Image (cartoon, rainbow, N blue to C red):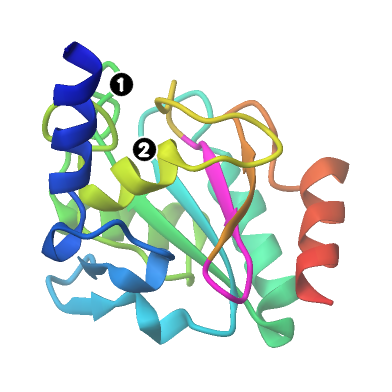
Amino acid sequence: MKVIIFLAMLLMSFPAGNVSDSIYDFTVEDIDGKEVDLQTYKGKVVMIVNVASKCGYTPQYEGLQALYEEYEDDGLEILGFPANNFKGQEPGTNEDIKEFCTLTYGVEFPMFSKVSVTGEDQHQLFTYLTALENPDFKGDIKWNFEKFLIDRDGTLIRRFRSNVKPESKEISEALKAALK
């Protein structure tokens, strides 16, 4: 019975009550408060990352920015979603987060408004992403800086835990294959 209730709640969390086929079914708010339809990224390879400013993995912003600079012209977009779900490591406002990322790490890739990536108030995009089958694993986000690699059709193709650095061989190989 609990499984049926969970599945019903999961289905209700998707846009218009329908199961989504891709990330393109979602609209999110950018860090400046503007609505962004993820259809904007159709045809691009997208890496979605839940980020935080006061985490041991925060220096990964540097690696993410380097990936963005290296592969942006090939069709890569990195989308940063600040979240305060893990030990309060993203306590600031959107303005604070934007200033920190820009001044400390020179972040130029798109950043979005702070969301919840786990728990009862989980943003529907992350409900969708964490439920998807992929060659790596599915289920709850365990910490800041988990990475979801989406192909040009909006389908999740890889998922990486926080300890996998943006400059790792594993991510580099997955990106190159997705960008072909």
Query: CB under 8 Å between callouts 2 and 1?
Result: yes
The front one of 96 and 32 is 32
The CA span between labels 2 and 1 is: 9 Å
Image coords of residue 106 (percent x, y): 50, 64
Image coords of residue 128 (percent x, y): 35, 47
Residue 1 drawn above or below residue 71: above
Residue 148's label in the rendered image is none
| Disc 2 residue type (three-letter) | Ala
Residue at x-position 27% and y-position 39%: 83
* Badge 1: residue crowd in 10 Å (few <14, some 14–19, many ≥20): some
**Which residue is denoted by mark 1 in the rendering?**
86
Magenta span: chief secondary structure? loop
**Which residue is denoted by mark 2 in the rendering?**
52
| Residue 69 highlighted magenta (yes or no) | no
Q: Quadrant of residue 26?
A: bottom left
Image coords of residue 55 (percent x, y): 42, 26
* Badge 2: residue crowd in 10 Å (few <14, some 14–19, many ≥20): many
Of the two numbered discs 2 and 1 in the rendering, the one whose residue sits closer to the viewer? 1
Residue 91, visible in the rendered structure: no
The quadrant of the rendering that contains the N terminus is top left
Left or right? Give the position of 130 relative to 90. Answer: right
Residue 157 drawn above or below residue 25: above
| Disc 1 residue type (three-letter) | Phe
Residue at x-position 26% and y-position 34%: 90
The front one of 11 and 37 is 11
What is the secondary structure assignment of the residue under circle 1?
Answer: loop
What residue span does the magenta drawing correspond to?
A: 145-154
Q: Quadrant of residue 22?
A: bottom left
The front one of 94 and 8 is 8
